[in-house]
Image (cartoon, rainbow, N blue to C red):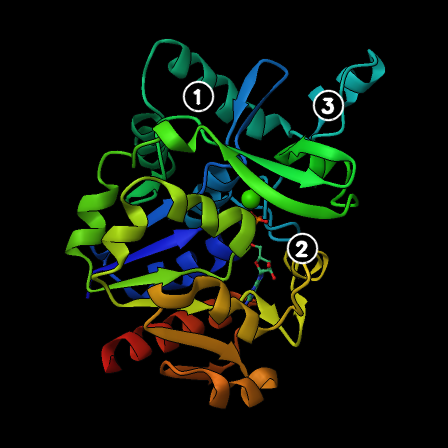
Amino acid sequence: MKIVTLAGGVGGAKLADGLAQLLPPENLTIVVNTGDDFEHLGLYISPDLDTVCYTLAGLANPETGWGRREETFHVLENLQELGGPDWFRLGDRDLATHIERTRRLREGQSLSLITRDFCQAWGVRQPVLPMSDQPVRTMVDTEDGELAFQEYFVHRKCEPKVKGFRFAGIATALPATGVLEAIEHADGIVVCPSNPWVSIDPILAVAGIRSALAAKLVVAVSPIIGGQTVKGPAAKMYTELGVQPSALAITCHYGKILSGFVLDRVDAKFAQNISIPTCVTNILMKNQDDRRSLAQDVLNLIQTL
Ligand code: GDP
Ligand code: CA
């Protein structure tokens, strides 16, 4: 079975890793949000792409879910001493990724080509594709005005109340090489339990991606369990936008594109109100086994559709 999965950072990477444990590498393609990308200290940072790649490579920090394991922060500490900006934490090993990616982008190489080469160096065998090679920047409209995504997410710790989102650059962004082909050849599309507003919506907004999904079996896993997020601001965003956060809200969010939905046992009561086939299971991924067993449940649901 050939699967394409749409992923943000931490939640996306965990399920992609579970799928990678079950499928031959050539049967899994991961399409990753780049709306969080930004320039910092003169470097091009692509947080979700790196989280997915580090996770698949076994290089991710197991405590945080992002950044690298066995990381040190000597550069950041010295930067702090000099009074430089230290609100975005970049580890020493991680910095090498950003330095080399920035160097190659400045030479005119595409983000997808650079990602392919990095994956090869890290031993990641699944194709990991940025959603687009053109810059798309998520902007968060808040009661304090419009903020660039990392300014909202990291610097302001998601505190300002959200009023809406804008994906700057989306009008001219094309899917990266291989994205539409992978979707076309897939037997199923898995929408990871990533933030719908700022991780999945940007991918769906890239020209041609949503319409390519219309002809496909699309299954989503809820990022909301018992009305709450496992991590991050998705539930807070729903509340601030006037929607009660729940597994049901996620199905409404994705609407017509979904053919199946996976929700947690604690949310089993919602299943009867969802008009598409569902799978009720444990969707909290605390370890490798949880990742693999959730991935298996997702594949089983796709098979029954
Ligand atoms: P980010 O880019 O690092 O913020 O990560 P994502 O957008 O991929 O994921 C954030 C979402 O993942 C949040 O809404 C979390 O609730 C959800 N999430 C994180 N871990 C898990 C998990 O183990 N199970 C489920 N179902 N959702 C999770
Ligand atoms: Ca992200």
Determine which of the numbered discs, if any, sits on residue 59 in the image. none
Determine whether label 3 and label 2 are within 8 Å by CB. Answer: no
Q: In which quarter of the image is the N terminus?
A: bottom left
Q: Where is residue 136 in the image (x, y as percent from the top left)?
A: 46, 31
Residue 72 in which image quadrant = top right
The amino acid marked with disc number 3 is: Leu
Mark pair 2, 1: CA separation: 32 Å
Q: How far apart are marks 1 and 3 (CA)?
A: 19 Å
In the image, which is nearer the foreground, mark 3 or mark 2? 2
Compared with 19, 260 (above or below) is below
Q: What residue type is labelled 1?
A: Arg
Residue mark closest to the camera, 1 vs 3: 1
Q: At numbered mark 2, what does the secondary structure look like: helix, strand or loop?
A: helix
- Which residue bears the numbered disc 2? 237
Counting residues from the start of the chain, the first of labels 2 and 1 encountered is 1
Left or right, residue 120 beside residue 11: left
Residue under label 3: 76
At which x and y percent is residue 272? 48, 90
Q: Name the residue under label 1.
A: 101
